[in-house]
Image (cartoon, grey):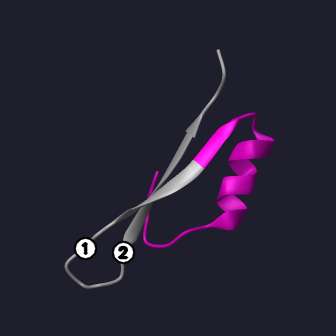
Amino acid sequence: VWSAQPSPAFEQALRNAGFSRVGTEEVAVARGVPDVVHLASKAR
């Protein structure tokens, strides 16, 4: 999920929904402040 800023509450919601691997990656943008992509996966 693309976001303008990190969200610890969203990351916790993903964990509560059963996602085991949760993290964020920063994405450089022209305006200076990096956006983030929230990543999550469930074990098979």
The residue pinned by badge 1 equals 29
As drawn, 20 above or below 37: above
Above or below, comparing residue 20 to residue 24 in the picture: above
Q: Earlier in the sequence, mark 1 or mark 2?
A: 1
Residue 10, how many percent across, how many down? 66, 58
Residue 35 position, x and y percent, is 38, 69
Q: Residue furthest bottom?
A: 32
Task: Look at label 2 and name its amino acid.
Answer: Pro
| Residue 40 placement (x, y as % from top left) | 57, 40
Residue at 35% over, 82% down: 33
Identity of the residue drawn at 61% across and 67% down: 7
Asked if residue 31 lies left or right of residue 21, the reply is: left
Query: Helix or strand or loop: what does disc 2 sit on?
Result: loop
Q: Which residues are magenta?
A: 1-22
Name the kind of residue labelled 1 in the image. Answer: Val
Q: Residues within 10 Å of mark 2 (few under 14, many from 20)?
A: some
| Residue 26 lies in the magenta-colored region | no
Q: Residue most toward the right?
A: 16
Query: Of all residues shown, which one is farthest toward the left?
Result: 30
Total numbered labels placed on residues in the image: 2
The quadrant where residue 41 appears? top right
- Classify mark 1: helix, strand or loop: loop
Residue corresponding to mark 2: 34
The answer to whether residue 10 is left or right of residue 2 is: right
Residue pictured at 43% horizontal, 72% vertical: 4
Image quarter hosting the C terminus: top right
On whether residue 18 falls in the magenta region, the answer is yes
The answer to the question of whether label 1 and label 2 lie on touching residues, with beta carbons closer than 8 A, is: yes
